[in-house]
Amino acid sequence: MRVGFNPNKDKQIASAGFYHQVIVPVYIPHFEGYFKDSFQILHYCLTSLFKTSHSKTYFTVVNNGSCKEVVLYLNDLFLKGQIHELIHVDAIGKLNAILKGLVGQKFEVVTISDSDVLFLNNWQTATYSVFESFPKAGAVCTTPSSRSLRTYTANLYWDTLFSKKIQISKVVNSQALKDFSISVGNENFYNENQLQYYLTIESKGVKAVAGAGHFVCTYRKEVFQSLNQLHTTFSLGGDSEASLLDIPVVANGLWRLSTADNYTYHMGNVVEPWMNEQVEKLTFSETEIKINLSPFNRISNFENILKNKIFSKFILNKTILRYFLVWRGLPKEAAKNYLT
């Protein structure tokens, strides 16, 4: 039996003013083996995120089947108001967990981050600067990589093929690239030339690096408004990240870029002293930072096929791209092993 009239019926939801969402999927099933230090890593991740994000940032954490201790920790953060949205699911896979966090909300930009990312001060400022300087920026990573220039970047080369704004530049923070190499367990991830040079595009005095990584990346809301896939059968890897995080960007005619300097660290799964030192150095970012995104025109299906399927086979060929990089300023000696 119903008595009375529900006061919320036909009532519009009041806006809280958030315009930047951060989604962090968390999977820590136990504290053994690979996951031995994961709880502390997660603590560093969320603490650094809370410290460095402005007041209009909405934090969504998706617990993807973690153990009881992690559940209690996340519940406590939610009850304290540090997490705005906490979703509990039973090990449905990283990308499916991300999809859970994307629905039911509307934000200008969405950051998707692994739970082993350490955020640095000014990461949002740097991200917004790229979006505002490059109207076609659809995804912006805050850890640049000199090896990302062949991953879903064909449309960037098509759009700027004869522009002088796309050039080889000296790496701003080569130590950050070395740190990333160590974090993924491969100190030789970048060769000597990749530590010195990367491909950048410049606009309004701002440089951005070609390509973007997955472990932390910020997307325009439009990227996810036309998703055709709402589920993946992969728990991790496969074609799930490409189909949900890469292809929708370029299919909309947008570019995948990174900040020129490093504003996020990949910690991996082993705690090291530098992590706590970095977190302790962070200062709270309470000041609101505005973001002004320029409108863009979506490309047709024909343009998408032309740029991202046909032209990509040409420009992303290692031999062709090597000549292109030399044309854009990479020393010939460095070009010999740059695309290894």
Image: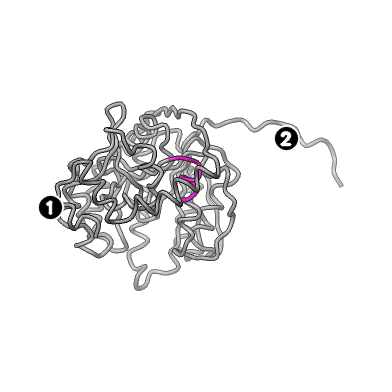
Locate residue 279 relative to residue 153 in the image: left or right: left
Which circle marks residue 333 in the picture? 1
| Residue 20 or residue 74, whichever sits in front | 20
Q: CA distance from mark 1 to mark 2?
A: 68 Å
Q: Position of residue 258 (x, y in %)?
A: 33, 43
Labels 1 & 2 near each other (Cβ < 8 A): no
**Is 23 in the magenta?**
no
Residue 123 sits in quarter: top left
Tell me the amino acid under the disc marked 2: Asn
Which element is circle 1 on? helix
- Residue 141 picture quarter: top left
Residue pictured at 26% horizontal, 33% vertical:
164
Q: Where's residue 13, x and y in %? A: 64, 33
Position of 43 compared to 330: left or right? Answer: right
Name the residue beneath numbered marker 2. Answer: 8
Q: Which residues are magenta?
A: 247-254
Q: Point out the tag, 1 or 2, that comes first from the N-terminus.
A: 2
Q: Is residue 256 above or below residue 41?
A: above
Query: Which numbered dot is residue 267?
Result: none
Where is residue 65? Give x, y as percent: 51, 64
Q: What quarter of the picture does the C terminus occupy? A: bottom left
- What's the residue type where badge 1 is placed? Glu
- Dominant secondary structure of the magenta stretch? helix
Residue at x 50% of width, y 55% of height: 243
